[in-house]
Image: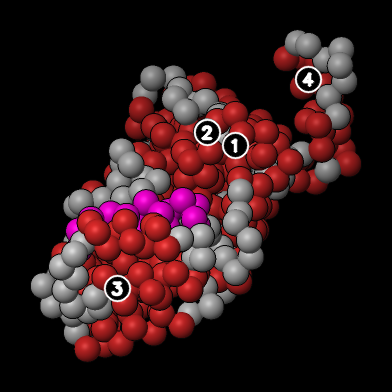
Amino acid sequence: MRSLFAFLCVFLTCALHASMGNIERWKRFCLGPAHECPEQIGLARDFAEDGFRNLAFYLLESARHVYGDELFDATYATNAVPVSNFRAYSTLPKNARSEADIERHIRAAAKDDPLLTQYLRLIDTYTPALETAKRDKAKAKATFIALLDEAEKTPELLRQLTVCQWLALPTLRIVNDPDRAKPLFLTIYFSDPHAYCGEFVEFRIRDIDVRRRESGILNQALAGLDEAAKVRKIRDLAWRDPGLFLSRNAPAFLLATDLPPFPQAAWVAFLEHPHMAFRNTALKTLLKMPDWTPETLTAIRSLATSPNPILRQQYYLLATRFLTDDEILARLHKDFPAITADTLKAVRTLHPKATP
């Protein structure tokens, strides 16, 4: 049975190649033919535009891990997550080489751009205070907090790449506020997945999420909830803030090992998550559990007839708990005709003693 399970893992992973999608859209997305890098990156872009920016980031990083930098970069160049920036920066004259030339161009352009005018006003207002603070961390922190408070009054301002580049690192290092820094780093990442701010931005984002989890944010979010409410909360966080669950070292494939205990129903819900780490870890966790509740068994059996091949994949692997090898292989052959009679015979030879 173990060998069959390993065979199914390898075969299905190759056959489906980790197809992903959007809450309902991703299920329909999986119904199409085998998807490659452009489709997966385009799907992550759709997530970002729908407001699931955290999930989009981790789906992009997963795609980069699977396909490699060269293919990922070429694909992302034409499927990038849109990032706002002041038009003045995209219209810099070719002869603007010095900081003074750039500043003259930016300030002249601000006459026709109220948002850019507001950005320059913030710079002019707070730069003297920051210069005065110098190495006084307490004063610098107070100044940056005031600056962030002022900038956040205009959400569109904090969606500009230039503003995020200006504020991201100080918000993390000086203000020491990962929650406020993360959206800024996400914008920088979407503009360039190889962006570097003291270290690569993707590492900063992952580290921020690890720090947030280690601070106990998951435990706090689940405290005092009954089981049904806890499952709903876990599922919502998994979609909107998946970095809280992911391993620091292998975010593409496995969840972290220091997560608080989750109800069995939460692991069942993870089987439908678009990120492979949630699906893979849910499979491993459910198979290790000595007993399933009747509700879990019913939910797993229902996957057998799902139109979504990703969900049927979960069924085939979990069905090793309640079907014989021959039953699993017979059902599997309906979904994947490429499995020949010889292949089936070879697998049966490896598992002559199929057990329910």
| Magenta residues, start to end | 1-17
Marks 4/2: CA–CA distance = 36 Å
Judged from the image, the secondary structure of the residue bearing numbered disc 2 is loop
Number of the label disc, if any, that sits on residue 102: 4
The amino acid type of the residue labelled 2 equals Gly
Image quadrant holding the C terminus, namely bottom left
2 and 1 marks in contact (CB < 8 Å)? yes
Marks 2/3: CA–CA distance = 37 Å
The amino acid type of the residue labelled 4 equals Ile
The kind of secondary structure the magenta stretch mainly shows is: helix
Asked whether 307 or 328 is in front, the reply is 328
Judged from the image, the secondary structure of the residue bearing numbered disc 3 is helix
Dot 2 crowding, Cα within 10 Å, few <14, some 14–19, many 20+? few
The amino acid type of the residue labelled 3 equals Asp
Asked whether 170 or 298 is in front, the reply is 298
In the depicted structure, whether residue 213 falls above or below residue 186: below
Please name the residue shown 48% across and 33% down the image.
201
Number of the label disc, if any, that sits on residue 326: 3
1 and 4 marks in contact (CB < 8 Å)? no
Marks 2/1: CA–CA distance = 6 Å
The amino acid type of the residue labelled 1 equals Phe
Please name the residue shown 57% across and 65% down the image.
30
Judged from the image, the secondary structure of the residue bearing numbered disc 1 is helix
In the depicted structure, whether residue 44 falls above or below residue 65: below
Give x and y (percent) for residue 183.
Answer: 52, 48
Number of the label disc, if any, that sits on residue 72: 1
Nearer the camera: disc 1 or disc 3: 3
State the residue position of label 2.
68
